[in-house]
Amino acid sequence: MRRPVLRPAALAVGGLVVAAAGCLFAATGSGAHSGAANAGRADGGALGAAAAAGVVDPGARPAAPALAGEDLDGNPVSLDGFRGQVVVLNVWGSWCGPCRAEADDLARLGESTRSQGVRFLGINTRDRDRAAARSFVRAHGIGFPSLHDPDGELLLRFPPALLNPQTIPSTLVIDRRGRVAVSIGGAVTDEELGPLVARVAQEAS
C-alpha cells in the first residue's frame, strides 16, 4: 500500500522559496487509490502549506518548461498558449483528499482573477480514467482546463525541488514572461494564494 507522508519544509531552489507540505507517496506496493484514502485524512496538515510561500524576485525566477497535450475532453492545450498572462498551474488528481479540500477555493479564485489577466491551468495526474477526472471537475465547478497527464510525464519536466511529482497537490504561479514566481507543495486556500497571485499580476509584463 502507498502511504502518504506529510513533510512540511521550505526549500530554496535558486532564489525561489518552495513551500512544501503535501502528500508524499512512498511506494511500498501498488494502488494509488488506497493511498488516496490515507491522503484524505491528511487534509488539515496540508492546508497550511502556503504559509511559507513567497514571490521570488523576477531576476531569480526559473523558466517554466514547455507543457502541451490534451485536456480532459481530448482537446489540445498548452502552457505556451497563455503567454502574456499570469498562469496559476495546479497539479491535482480526483483520488487526492487535499485536492478536494482546495478545489472549490481554486475554482472561485480562477473566476475572480480573470479580469486581472490571470488564467488557471491544471495538470491532472495519476487518473487513468478521464471520466473520474471529469466528474471531479463537475463536482467542484472548475471552469479552467487541465492537461491529462496520467503517468506524470509533464511533472518530470520540472526540477523535483521546484515541483515534486510525488507531492500532490502542488501549485505554481507563472509570470507573464513564463517564469515561475511562486511554488507551493500541498493544498492551498484562496486566502493564501490570492495575495501571491495579485502581486505577480500587478507586475509589468
Image (tube, rainbow, N blue to C red):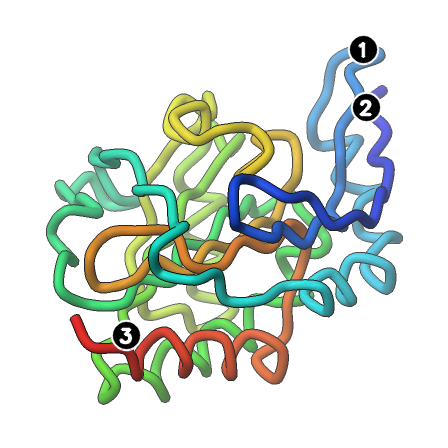
Query: Could you tell me which secondary element the residue under label 3 belongs to?
Result: strand
Q: How many marks?
A: 3
Q: Nearer the viewer, residue 73 or 197?
A: 197
Q: Earlier in the sequence, mark 3 or mark 2?
A: 2
Q: Mark 2 highlights which residue?
A: 2
Badge number at residue 184: none
Q: Mark 1 highlights which residue?
A: 29
Hey, which residue is sitting farthest top in the picture?
29
Q: Earlier in the sequence, mark 3 or mark 1?
A: 1
Q: CA distance from mark 2 to mark 1?
A: 6 Å
Disc 3 or disc 1, which is closer to the eye? 3
CB-based contact (under 8 Å), mark 3 and mark 2: no
For the N terminus, which image quadrant? top right
Could you tell whether 201 is left or right of 33 in the image? left
Residue 172, compared with residue 194, is above or below; it is: above
Q: Earlier in the sequence, mark 2 or mark 1?
A: 2
Which residue is at a point 44% across and 80% down the rendered structure image?
109
Query: Could you tell me which secondary element the residue under label 1 belongs to?
Result: loop
